[in-house]
Amino acid sequence: MTDSNIQLISTVSEDSKLVLSLQDVEVPQPGADEVVIRIEAAPLNPSDLGVMFGVADMSTATQTGTEHSPSITANVPAKVMPSLKARMGKATPVGNEGAGTVIAAGSSPAAQALMGKTVAVIGGGTFRQFLRANVQSCLVLKEGTTAKEGASSFVNPLTALAMVETMRAEGHKAIIHAAAASNLGQMLNRICIADGVDLINIVRKPEQETLLRDMGAKYVVNSSSESFIADLTAAIVETGATIAFDPIGGGQLTSDILNCMEAAAALNMKEYSVYGSDTFKQVYIYGALNRGPITLNRNFGFAWAVNGFLLFNMLGKLGPETAMKMRKRVADEITTTFASHYTHEVSLAEALKLQSVAAYSKQATGEKYLITPQK
Amino acid sequence: MTDSNIQLISTVSEDSKLVLSLQDVEVPQPGADEVVIRIEAAPLNPSDLGVMFGVADMSTATQTGTEHSPSITANVPAKVMPSLKARMGKATPVGNEGAGTVIAAGSSPAAQALMGKTVAVIGGGTFRQFLRANVQSCLVLKEGTTAKEGASSFVNPLTALAMVETMRAEGHKAIIHAAAASNLGQMLNRICIADGVDLINIVRKPEQETLLRDMGAKYVVNSSSESFIADLTAAIVETGATIAFDPIGGGQLTSDILNCMEAAAALNMKEYSVYGSDTFKQVYIYGALNRGPITLNRNFGFAWAVNGFLLFNMLGKLGPETAMKMRKRVADEITTTFASHYTHEVSLAEALKLQSVAAYSKQATGEKYLITPQK
C-alpha cells in the first residue's frame, strides 16, 4: 500500500481567487461500515465542472503551480462572492462518482464483503487516488466489469432511470428529452426502447439525428431545423408526451416545448377556453448547459409547471424501494443499457492543464472525459 | 316576468374580426336541478377581459352598433387565429360570476329551496339579465346580504382561500403575494391576519404600501424601491416564506422572488453546494397582467418550481371537503373578510362603450368595475 494520495481540490479565497490544485493527503483508514477504494476511473460530469470552476470567470484563468503539480487560478466576480461564504478558504474536493478496487475494509460484515471487489462509488470527491466511502455509497460491479466500464454507474444511469420513473409516478405516457445525443440521452433512449416508452429526442445537429436513429430512436427532431416547431408538435400529437427533461435551461427551448404540448392538446379541445387546455404540461430542467435567462413565452394556458430536477431530490421523492431497484438494474446492465463512452482519458495532473480545461469545459455533446487518477 | 334577456357576447369570425355585442335571448326555463337568476351585479374580473377581447389587437378597436345597442369590432392577429378554431363563429357568453335573485326554480327540493333567495353564482356567462344555473353553482347569501355585496363571492374569495390552503397542503409556512393591493390581495391580507399566517405583500406604489399597512399588514415591500431585493430577502428571512403567488407573470418578478428565497435559504447552509440550497421554492403564476415573456435569471439552485395556478384546477387538487368549507366561509364573511370594492358601476350597454373599455382594460390596482345588467 502506498502512502501518497493525490486529490483534486477547488478553493475560493477571501481575495476573490479560485484555485484548482492537487493536494497530497493521507491514505484514509476505514471505519466499521466503510471501505477504502483505489479510484481507477472517474468521469468528468457537467456537475463536476460546476464545483471545479462554476463560480469563477474562466476567461481570467492562468496556469500556475509546477509542471508536475499544475494548478489554475481565476478571478471570482464580486457579485458571486457573498454566496460563497460557506466554502471560503476551504479545500473543496471534486468528483461525484467513479470506480475502483476496494483495498481496505472496516470490521462490519457489509464492509468486509466488499474487500477486493471492483465497486462504483457515489460522492465524496472521487478525483483522487484513494477514497474512503460508506458501504451504502458503493455499488458492487458484476464479475468481469472493469472500473472504467463502471465509472459512470450513478449520475447518468440513475438520472435516466429517474426520468422514466418520474414519468410513471406522475401519470405521463411519453417523454421529451433535450440535448438527447449525450451519453445520458443515449442511455435514456436504450431504456425507453427496452421498456416500450415513447421518447421524443431533441438534438441540434443532423449527425446527432443519424446517431440516435441508428440506435433505434423512432422520434428525433432537430431544433436547428426550420420545421422544428411543427416537427415537435407532430411527434407530441403522435406520442401524447406531456413531460420533458431539459439540461439546457437558458433560452427558449423549455418555452417551445410547453407551447408545442399546448398546441397538441388544443387539437382535442371541444370548447375554447381563455385559460388554455386542461392538459397538464411539465418540463424538468436538470442542468445549466446554458446559464442565461430561461425565457417563457406563455401561450400554454395555466396547466403547466417548470421545475428544477436534481437526482438526489428525485430519489427521495421516488422512495428507497424504487431507488434500490434502479441501482440493481444499473449493475446488471452497465455494459449494455448504461454503457458510457469516453473520448479522452486524463490523469489528475493533465486535468489541470489549461488546454484540457478549455477542451472539456465546452461540454460538447459526444465528447466525454474520464479521469484516471492512478496514471 | 319579462321576455327580454340581454346578454353580452364575444364572437370571432372567419375573417379575423372579434365582435363584442349585446344579444337578446329568451328567458330560460329551469330544469329540475336548476334555477333562473335575475342577475343584479357581476364584477368585471381580469379573466373576463381575457374572454371578451384577449385574443384581439385592441389598438384596432372601433365602436360599431347603435347608441342603444353598442358593439365593438377589433382585428384578431393572424397568428392567433389557428388557436381559436373551437370558438370560431360561436357567440361566447361572458361573465364568470355574479349575484341576484332566484325568480324561477326547478322541481327538485334543492332548487325549490332557493326560490326568492339572493344567491351568488359561478360560471355560465353572468353578463346578462337572466341566467339559468345548476344549484351546485349557486351560493345562498346570508339574509340581508345584497347582490352587489355578494357579486364577487367566488373568483377572488376562493382564489385567496385556495392560496392559503395550498400553502398548508404543500407544507410552506408563509406566503408572498405580488400585486398585493388588489381586491384579491386585500382579502388575502385579511384571511392571513385572521388565520395567523405571515404574508409578504409586494406592491409598486407608496400609497399601496400605506393602504395595506393601514389594513394591518406587517410585511409590505415595494418593487419600485431601490432596496426591493434587500427588503424582500429580509422579509423572507423573518417569515420563512417559500411559496409565492404572482398574477403578473411577464417580466422578472417571479425570478426575483425565487432568487430572494434562495438568498434567504443560503444564510442557513452549513456547506456550500453547487446545486444551491435544498429548500424547495415555489411560485404560482395565477394571472397574466403582463403577457410578455417570463424571464427566469437562474441563481436559485435546483429545488424550485414555477406553476400556472388556476382556481378550478386547484379546487380539484384540494378536494371537495376543503372546497365546501371554503364556500361556507365566504358566505359567512362576505361583507367583512371577503368584501369587494367597486369604483365604477356600468350597465351592459355602457360596458361596450369604447371609453369604458379603455378605462377598465387598464386593470389598474384599486380600480374595479361592476356590471349591473338590470340598469
Image (tube, coloured by chain):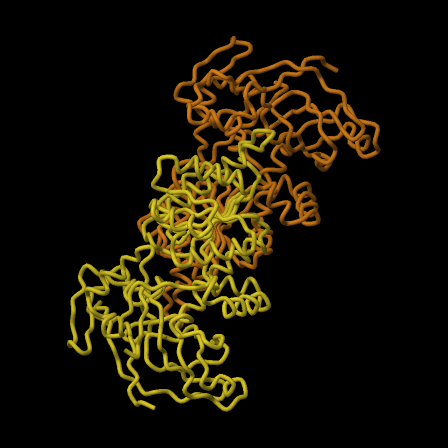
Chain colours: A orange, B yellow
Nearest the camera: B121 or B310? B121
Could you say which quadrant of the image residue B4 lies in? bottom left
Residue B17 left/right relative to A123: left
**Image vertical order of residue A300 relative to residue B1, above or below:** above
State the count of labels: 0
List x then y, in percent, for residue B159. Answer: 47, 61
Name the residue: 56% across, 31% down: B273
Name the residue: 84% across, 28% down: A107
Say whether residue A303 is visible. yes
**Image vertical order of residue A123 relative to residue B167, above or below:** above
List x then y, in percent, for residue B24. Answer: 27, 83
List x then y, in percent, for residue A167. Answer: 56, 54
Residue A110 left/right relative to B32: right
**Image vertical order of residue B248 relative to residue B270, above or below:** below
Say whether residue A176 is visible. no
Question: Which quadrant is home to the C terminus of chain B?
Answer: bottom left
Nearest the camera: A273 or B346? B346
Question: Which quadrant is home to the N terminus of chain B?
Answer: bottom left
List x then y, in percent, for residue B306. Answer: 47, 49
Residue A227 left/right relative to B323: left
Nearest the camera: B166 or B191? B191
